[in-house]
Amino acid sequence: MARKTATFTVEADGRDKGKSYLLTEMPASQAEKWAARAFLALARSGVLLPDDLTGAGFAGIALLGLRALSGLRFEDAEPLLDEMFGCVQFMPDKRPQLARTLIEDDIEEVATRMRLREEVMALHTGFSLADARSKAAASALPGSTDPT
C-alpha cells in the first residue's frame, strides 16, 4: 500500500494565499525514529511525558501538541522541524504531477509554515490540531451540546 498523501491549499490572507502543497507520509521506519528523537529531546528538556504516551510515536507527539516542541533547545528542535518539511512539496498550478521539492520562496509566511507542520502531523496521526481547536471552540459556544 502506498504512503498517505494530502493536499493543503492556503486560504488565509497573505503572500501564500492560494498556494498548494502536497504532503506525503514518512516511511514507518523514519516516522518511528522521528518520534523517538522528539520524545527523547522533550524528556531531556524537562517536559513531563505521560507514561502512556511514550510508545505512541507520532500520535503521542500529536497529543502533546506541536507547541510542546517549543520547550526544546533549538539545537534539538531544528533537525526535527527540518525533517517535517521533507514531507512537503510545492504544487505549481495546484497540479500534483508537478509537485517539487520546496525552495525558499515557496513559503513566504511564518503562519503557513506553522499550518503545514500541523497538516504533516495530521497526515501521520489522523489527529488534526486544527479540527480539535475548531471542535473546542464550537463546544464553548452558548447552547452547544457537543461534549467534545
Image: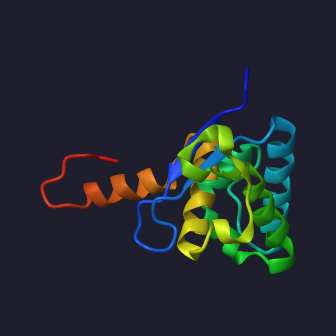
Q: Residue at x 68, y 75 (%)?
A: 70
Please identify the quarter of the rendering in which residue 124 is found. top right
Q: Residue at x 67, y 71 (%)?
A: 105
Residue 52 can be seen, yes or no: no
Q: Nearer the viewer, residue 81 or 16?
A: 16
Please identify the quadrant where the N terminus is shown.
top right
Outermost residue to the top: 1
**Residue at 79% from the left image edge and 51% from the top image edge:** 35
State whether residue 113 is above or below residue 7.
below
In the image, is residue 51 above or below residue 16? above
Asked whether residue 64 is in view, the answer is yes
Residue shown at 68% from the left, 46% from the top: 99
Residue 20 lies, in percent from the top left, at 55, 53
* Count of marks, rendered view: 0
- Quick check: 122 left or right of 53? left
Is residue 97 found left or right of 84 in the rendered image? left
